[in-house]
Amino acid sequence: MDEIRNPIVALIAVCRFAARSAQGSPFHSLGTPGPPMSTLSYDPHNEWAVEIGRFMLAFGSIEHVTHLCLRDLPTEKLEGIGRSLLLSKRIALVQSILENREHEAFTRLANLLNKASKLAEERNLIAHNPLVLDVYADTDDQMFIQAIIRSARSSGRSTDLPGLKRLRVQVESLAANLLSAFHEALIIQKGMR
């Protein structure tokens, strides 16, 4: 590669070279550039891929628990209703089923579902947006590069790798606690029949 004096052009050239040479993870382009420039990203050690994968698997467990709740907790049959509902609607339906039940197990389950509902926005950020490199220049033209997942729709919504790791830990913990709370509520419910 010839010497390139412009650091932004050099970065893009390196990224394109790495993508063509099949080293590391595939690149993703960002439809809307962020300030001042977003370019293709690269995950050579699969750090992002592992964190995203673990995050999404844990969120899959949360979604599964909402289906279990709709299958096993209603006193009337809700044959297939939950299958076509989005997560937020399934959570709202389960919470309405739980609201008149007085045992603390049902309250705990409802509270954990509320936390899952709040984390769904983060899930959407991770699931529906690419990993990009943001390139910044300060007033002295010193270049800064940051790998992030940035929302293409909501300006200012993004996460870096440490933020993704914190989210992943939260979601994994929530998934385990939610499954435990579901089992506890199910045992209480069966004892009430």
Image (cartoon, rainbow, N blue to C red):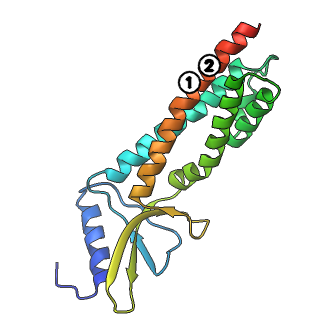
Q: Measure how far apart labels 2 and 1 are at the Cα level.
A: 6 Å
Q: How many marks?
A: 2
Residue tagged by mark 2?
A: 184
Residue at image coords 38%, 87%: 138
Residue toward you, 145 or 152: 145
Query: Which amino acid does the dot numbered 2 rest on?
Result: Glu
Task: Pinpoint residue 85: horizontal percent, then vertical percent.
Answer: 72, 37
Where 5 falls versus 90 (above or below)? below
Residue tagged by mark 1?
A: 180
Q: Is residue 141 left or right of residue 189?
A: left
Do the numbered discs 2 and 1 sit on residues whose CB atoms are within 8 Å?
yes
Q: Residue 53's image quarter?
A: top left
Where 98 falls versus 167 (above or below)? above
Residue toward you, 36 or 3: 36
Q: Secondary structure at mark 1?
A: helix
Residue at image coords 44%, 53%: 164
Query: Which amino acid does the dot numbered 1 rest on?
Result: Ser
Residue at image coords 45%, 43%: 169
Quadrant location of the N terminus? bottom left
Task: Pinpoint residue 20: horizontal percent, then vertical percent.
Answer: 27, 63
Q: Is residue 70 left or right of residue 148?
A: right
Task: Pinpoint residue 66: horizontal percent, then vertical percent.
Answer: 65, 30
Q: Residue 25's image quarter?
A: bottom left
Residue toward you, 12 or 155: 155
Quadrant location of the C terminus? top right
Task: Pinpoint residue 58: horizontal percent, then vertical percent.
Answer: 49, 37
Q: Residue 113's image quarter?
A: top right
